[in-house]
Image (spheres, helix red, strand yellow):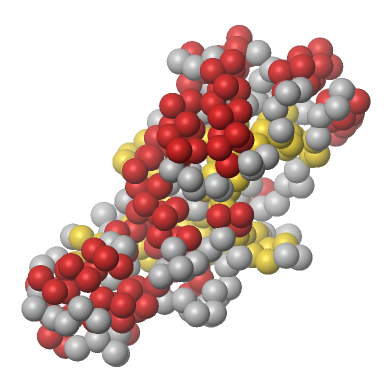
Amino acid sequence: MKTLLDFNLQELESLVVSLGEQKFRAKQLQQVLLDGKFEYESNNLPKSLLEKLANNGYIFQPLRILKKVVSKDKTVKYLYKLEDGNIIEGVLMTYKYGKTLCVSTQVGCKMNCAFCASGLSYVRDLSCGEILGQVVAVNKMLGGTLKDRKITNIVLMGSGEPLDNFDAVVKFLQEITSPQGMNFSVRNISLSTCGIPQKIVKLADLGLSITLCLSLHASNDVVRGQIMPIARRYTIKELLKALQYYYDATNRRIIIEYVLIDCVNTHVEQARELAMLLQNLPCHVNLIRLNPVPERGLKPANEIVSKTFLSMLVRNGISATIRRTTGDDVTGACGQLRISEMKKGE
């Protein structure tokens, strides 16, 4: 099966013309797709085009919302079922400034970080259309359309390492920000990566000035290597060089993500070391108290330790805050998304 959400407008134009239909049908088709409609809901498309698309194995939507669970803080976790039967998760968070959707980029994740549920298994990459389909499906469920979008912000922080699925993610970013498509501002999109230096540089060169978030989680290579396997391939020095390149190319402040794990990376000396590392990089540090994953066996730092760590960063001139946890009661918080179906009671 081939999902039509994988196609940009120019590719849709080529497709409909190749099927013997008029070129203007492509724009109509794109609107139907981005409104989240399925084949049977596309009233403004001719039957001839619908039949040709079906006969050639094209599908309108690559996923369906299988289930949703609402947290006590109103965070919503969605379970999506893909066409091949695989399951991914996503999270919708509501703030004063709007609604932020956290999307996944892979079924599982190859990175296997010691604190994250997504890395417990890896199946495959998502296509551009499958990433975009998450935004389209939730926007529709919220009563939104292409012309009246209900989602204001997107964070690529669900399951998967976005830069490990580089081509599909870049095409998604190009499509989601296109004036011909959903027309999101790059300033309303954030991408979180555990750090692949050459891909960070490549992203900077493409001119997609989204907010880049680095999952650092340690102040030195030794500790980072213990909790993040990718740190055995790339040093913090290499990462900082790539981040500086990204800042110079985009003029966008870098976000450093640092999960606080009890007795692993929360000592005062490590806070000082982190401050020294970041002193010349225009950045903000998001401290995140670990959201427990049963299979991982790690514990979050307590509130006193977390505030002490924060205080040491601020005292050394680093912009930093402790991120508010949302959705943890439905395992929808940072690091808790996975690819298995939600159990009863979640």
User: Residue at point 60% right, 34% down?
Assistant: 248
User: Residue at point 19% right, 88% down?
Assistant: 46
x%, y% of residue 94?
A: 68, 63
Q: Residue furthest top?
A: 222
Quarter of the image where one finds residue 252? top right
225 vs 6: above or below:
above
* Residue 17 visible in the snapshot: yes
Q: Nearer the viewer, residue 67 or 233?
A: 233
User: In the rendered view of the protein, which quadrant contains the C terminus?
Assistant: bottom right
Q: Nearer the viewer, residue 42 or 115?
A: 42
User: In the rendered view of the protein, which quadrant contains the N terminus?
Assistant: bottom left
14 vs 162: above or below:
below
43 vs 328: above or below:
below
User: Residue at point 57% right, 22% down?
Assistant: 241
x%, y% of residue 150?
A: 58, 73
- In this rendering, would 157 be left or right of 54? right
x%, y% of residue 38?
A: 31, 77
x%, y% of residue 101?
A: 57, 58
